[in-house]
Image (cartoon, helix red, strand yellow):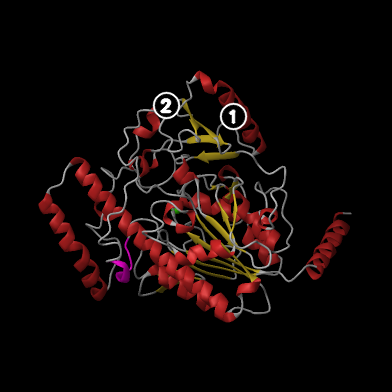
Amino acid sequence: MEKVISFLLAITSALSYAGAAKQPNILFLFTDDHALKALSAYGGPLAKIAPTPHLDRLAKEGMLFEHCLVSNSICAPSRAVVLTGKYSHLNGQLTNKGSFDGSQQTAPKLLRAAGYQTAIVGKWHLKSTPTGFDHFEVLKGQGQYYNPMLITNGRNVNHTGYTTDIITDQALNWLKKRDIEKPFFLMCQHKAPHGRWEPALRHLNTFEETAIPEPPTLFDYYDGRSAASANHKMGIADDMGPHRLMFRYSSKFTPEQFKVFDGHFRPRNEALEKLNLRGRDRTRWNYQRYIKNYLRCVKAVDENVGRMLKFLDDSGLAKDTVVIYSSDQGFWLGEHGWFDKRWMYEESLHTPLLVRWPGVTKAGSTNDALVSNLDFSQTFLDIAGARIPGDMQGRSLTPLLRGKVPANWRKTHYYHYYEAGGHGVPIHYGVTNGRFKLIRFPDEKLNTWEFFDLKTDPMEMTSCYDDPKYKQPIADLKKELDRLRRKYLIRESN
Ligand code: CA
């Protein structure tokens, strides 16, 4: 009986491919730590100063998602969620430690089975050897900004140049030599703009004469919230260290590169030492040094997205290719005095999501539904017309991309961070409905809750957990939190 059923399933699936429209190519452009505020299509005070025209083109020609929320705001876990469509406790990648279990079901494996040619070029960050790809060419660990080594189908290959450019070069090389009889699924994944932010030589002087506006919460005393945020170790004032501030460098440069790179930073660093800045003045200097280098790294990403889009145009592939741009999570650009991510607060919870699907998605459209990186796997499979396994935990975004948000679309989002102590951030989980947010810090020393009204307090400066005015919404969200934890199969020990 089982054999008959699987035979019938195989025939149905073959017929559905034959009967469906041509399977589109999928180009997944993914970056590391790209905050919404550093992508000009999302607006904000940096949009005019540091525009990202090529990324904005994707928004103009496709859909911009205003509320794409990650399920665990940190690098390796987010990547595992994107590959599996499952929360961290089920895909096994709870933190940046440990190695991804590549034997499990992933979207690339299923796309390959559905007739796609699959490749990943750039940052992998999951330690184990990539599985499910016809071609992989990945950085070891974090990689470096200059002269990267790329593990190329198991072989170590050294490259000379700027990593963001090289990842694009290699992705384009693969596209040019791919099997044109099959649709492709290419994950082109940049290291940038992850720290430590070493800009391309051509961008060292970009923003040099500009004072970047400070976020209103650059100086935050954390007094309106639980003890959790005050214990952070991600302060622009005290925690950046010499590598993040370019007093020391992380890349191994060639002598020629070093001459230009060090020639830029060394005299500026020496000038700073003479100024002997202290307190808020020094924090302000750190912020300018950090944000300029961060935005310079984003600029190289934007230029390289432009190169990919131009290739699609020139090769005639653009009309048959769905282009998706996202990042593994958001990032702090000085809000609350922070760099880094991890918290369930807005700036690290949100990640950019732009999708261009020619002939399907309305150009210049925006969508305000609560979507998540948990939805990406199912979206890839749905675009491909492939079967979506029942154990994936997100939902395909294709109805939204076609212009309709289903009536039963999620109204709340569950979040869970597990890497205890990383940059001083404790384990926490919570739920948001876009208007209110409830966060639980279960650690026995903290054992506390926070609750925010995002309408009256969008910068999340004051927890209203003890305010009687919010008794009902807090009770409602607690109930919802329990429901979601059961739905997503969270064990009590999680
Ligand atoms: Ca990241």
Does residue 290 appear to the left or right of 452 in the view shown?
left
Residue kind at label 1, given as amino acid type? Leu
Residue 450, image x and y in percent? 47, 29
Q: Quick one: label 1 or label 2, which is nearer the N terminus?
A: 2
Check contact, mark 1 vs mark 2: CB within 8 A: no
Compared with 181, 333 (above or below) is: above
CB of mark 2 near ligand 1 (< 8 Å)? no
Q: Which mark is residue 446?
A: 2
Query: Is 449 placed left or right of 383 in the picture?
Result: left
Mark 2 lies on a secondary structure that is loop
Q: Which residue is mark 1?
A: 477
- Please state which amino acid type lies under the numbered disc 2: Leu
Residue extending furthest toward the left? 274
Give the quarter of the image for residue 477: top right
Which range is magenta? Answer: 198-204
Image mark count: 2
Mark 2, other Cα within 10 Å: few <14 / some 14–19 / many ≥20: few
Q: What is the C-alpha distance between the residues marked 1 and 2?
A: 20 Å
Residue at 76% x, 69% y: name it.
21
